[in-house]
Amino acid sequence: MSKNSCRQAVLIVDDSDSVRKRVAQVLRMSAIDADVLTASGGAEALAMMAAQPVTLVLCDVEMPGLDGFNFLKITRGHADLAEIPVIMLTVKEDLGAKVKGLTEGASDYLTKPFHNEELVARVRVHLKLKQLQDELRLKNAKLEELSRLDALTQISNRRHFMEVLESEFARAQRYTATLSLVMLDVDHFKLVNDTWGHVAGDDALIGVTNAARALLRKCDHAARYGGEEFALLLPETPLEGARIVAERIRRSVSEVVIAQPLGEFSVTVSLGIATFPGTGIANPSELVRQADEALYAAKRAGRNQVCVAPVE
């Protein structure tokens, strides 16, 4: 079964061949919607779990070599395995062992010999719980991703950008590295909206975004800073390198044609650059301030151009 498989899988871990076969037979005959796998010990089980997805583990407590408690300890301490539920199997009515297992992360306990109906019922419950937990985790991850993105352009929003900026600035300080920030603003954007409408204005912002992203590296970071203003963070990039990138973006944007039902148009952008280390740049806020000053210098100079900080 491949790593990308969506099908659930139950892994039975027991040093007794007869127990493994019996449990596997019961589960297969119950028609649960999951593959049934077996391992003769904890070490073999860990190797199997590293090689393929496992949804639920039924693990004997007393096994030679790596016993059930140590197997449980290893899985609970491994990021990729910690969320897999483990049902412990034991032949003893030992309350202390049960408490220990549950305390260390076991999801449930079954005492051998167990009734087939109880075994199947508990497996079904834990498979369903795992499925619901995985779905919730995916939804939460999606919500977290959406909370970081600008809904229109699908690049980072301002909040997430500031988090990235803080992190990259700290890294640049720590390793004495360069960090350039390009602030970009669409020229005469209000006129675009007034002339062509807000839908066309949105299309223009998407066109600007795509043109800029096509010229950035994977390590660079683009964000919609607000309205028609964008921020481009370029790690390990000196001022002159940032100037070259900004100029390429300026030219590329000017060549983008935004087609509309009543015609087509294009836009231009003004860009300002600041680079750390630089005069007076001791924190991320100052880097943003200087890049903004350079941007507005480009605006004052006639737009559709690139200016760099410090601005006299």
Image: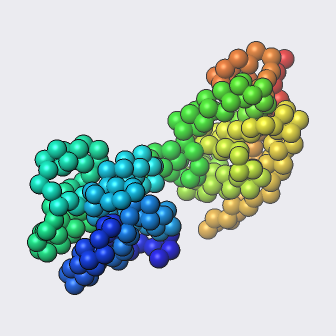
Q: Is residue 243 left or right of residue 256?
A: right
Residue nearest the observer in this picture, 204 or 56: 56
Picture coordinates of residue 117, whole percent (x, y): 11, 74
Picture coordinates of residue 216, whole percent (x, y): 75, 50
Residue nearest the observer in this picture, 94 or 254: 94
Q: Compared to 18, does 300 lie above or below?
A: above
Figure coloring: rainbow
Q: Is residue 118 left or right of residue 84?
A: left
Picture coordinates of residue 42, whole percent (x, y): 39, 60
Q: Is residue 278 left or right of residue 8?
A: right
Residue reaching furthest to the top: 280
Q: Residue at x 32, y 60 (%)?
A: 63
Picture coordinates of residue 270, whole percent (x, y): 76, 39
Q: Compared to 257, does 17 lie above or below?
A: below
Q: Residue at x 72, y 58 (%)?
A: 265
Q: Residue at x 33, y 67 (%)?
A: 15
Residue nearest the observer in this picture, 23 or 145: 23
Q: Is residue 203 left or right of residue 139?
A: right
Q: Compared to 188, does 275 lie above or below?
A: above
